[in-house]
Image (cartoon, rainbow, N blue to C red):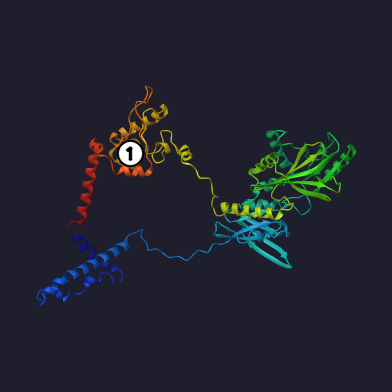
Amino acid sequence: MNFLRRRLSDSSFVANLPNGYMMDLQRPESPTSSPASPAPERKQQQTPASATSTGSSFLSSFSGVVKQNTPGQTEPVVTAPVVRKPKILLVIDDVHTDWSKYFRGKKLNGEYEIRVEQAEFSEINLAAYVNGGCMIDMQLIRNGTKVVRSFKPDFVLIRQHAYSMTQGEDFRSLVIGLQYGCAPGLNSLMSIYNFCSKPWVFSQMIKIFHTLGPEKFPLNEQTFYPNHKEMITAPTFPVVVKMGHAHSGMGKIKVENQYDFQDITSVVALAKTYATSEPYIESKYDIRIQKIGSNYKAYMRTSISGNWKANTGSAMLEQIAMTDRYRLWVDSCAEMFGGLDICAVKAVHGKDGKDYIIEVMDSSMPLIGEHVEEDRQLIADLVVNKMSQLVTGQISPQKPVSLSQVQVQSQPQHGPPAGHPKPAAQGGPRSGSSSPAQSSQGSPQRARSASTSPSQAFQPGPFLQQQPKPAAQGEGTSQTGPGAAPQRQPPQLNKSQSLTNAFSISETLQRGNASEDEAKAETIRSLRKSFASLFSD
């Protein structure tokens, strides 16, 4: 009480009190407290009540002051609901597809809305920074109105070819800028840039061909010429010559004989580019296997007009069954360049009854068939899933990991931890007929427990792991067979059992360890001295 009097008499302490505190202590005494009162019975009844009210007000005032002066304890602040800023999705595609309707009403993890900005490569420009990401400048004309906007994309969906040798269709610098600004994309920007050269992509298919073999991955023969100087002749005729990097049947010429091959060589010299040649295959139909996330589709396209290019003129398209052979093709190609979320494999089924893989397409592949709307919705769902993982930092739901798998990953070499036991070891006795490996793991633990200091012995986790359980708790100690380990491994408990037994150690174990009793007595003496110093004069 002397300590409290000195503390409350301090002018700085009283000055820091809020208004209204300690007012009861400053009021004059009630007339009922006078010893000359003519009503002693009323005095006896009111005095305890007055003392009780005064004491309660004093304690409440003092507790309020302590709460306000205690560091780390703050009053809960009621905040208004935070309005999340929408995430910006940049879709690079032509105007024929309105991608905003496929993302309407969708949210990332139920919190972030998606704002879709759509433009072609020719309608955007950018500037990329080390710390600021990339800033997109978009200038386009929609319904006769010029639209100019600047924004920082959170995700990019590329549905347009980034490079073609056609004049004005080289947008590789924009892909570099997006990668420079660390903008995540679908497919990845690294794969988009690698797909800007078809021979480079074909070289990855050659690796798959050598890995799987010609039976599982029937890749078509192809010859690469870095320039026109090596284009002297072809192994067989007719052949198909592909000049540079082009799409939709452009830059492909069918060469019937040696003389036509020499003529096309002069054209390659003027183009100043590389070229490839591959045997011409008389096809019955073309095959296309596409993969969008985990969705697979296979199509067969048969030319009706008789053109050797199946994508030129009239053709009949129908969906066919997805076989394991087709699935292996597209899954193998989807692993190139770090993984392709959207890709397609093109093959030719010849009149000889064999299949020949000729090309792989990335996320810029055209959608065909009767399920175009479904495919676009699949792409939109895939983008939402990727944005949830990459933009907001949320991980998609994974398969729950079993306790045994956690033990295998986190188990140290000297023995299993006490907090992660095996399910079979909970709540049951262990016989001494354990394997030699188990007994060898238990030996270092017992050796360490013998040299444990008293302060370390009272830690719940290490103590239970190192000290064997006493026989009074009903554990079996019998050993079966002469080859049994001489000492059995101490049983392991889960977390709840460890905490319970740590605070309820048997008296036998406490009496058997004098050093532990001394540590307890020393702790109690220290606490008594601390309390005595606080409330002494």
Residue hosting label 1: 463
Question: Whole-percent x and y of residue 390?
Answer: 57, 52
Quadrant of the snapshot with the N terminus = bottom left
Task: Inspect the image, locate mark 1, and give the three-letter code of the amino acid beneath it.
Answer: Phe
Q: In this view, does 188 lie above or below 102?
A: above
Quadrant of the snapshot with the C terminus = bottom left
- Sort mark 1 into few (<14), some (14-19) or many (20+) by Cα contacts within 10 Å: some
Residue at the image point whose x is 88% and y is 37% from the top: 258
Question: Whole-percent x and y of residue 357?
Answer: 75, 40
In depth, the one of 296 and 221 nearer the eye is 296
- The answer to which image quadrant residue 7 occupies is bottom left
- The answer to which image quadrant residue 77 occupies is bottom left
Task: Look at the image and tell me whether residue 304 can be seen.
Answer: yes
Q: Is residue 275 above or below residue 477?
A: below
Residue at the image point whose x is 87% and y is 39% from the top: 261
- As helix, strand or loop, the secondary structure at mark 1 comes to helix
Question: Whole-percent x and y of residue 399?
Answer: 53, 45
Residue at the image point whose x is 85% and y is 42% from the top: 254
In depth, the one of 195 and 457 nearer the eye is 457
Q: Is residue 2 above or below residue 35?
A: above
Question: Whole-percent x and y of residue 335?
Answer: 65, 42
- The answer to which image quadrant residue 329 occupies is top right
Residue at the image point whose x is 25% and y is 72% from the top: 23
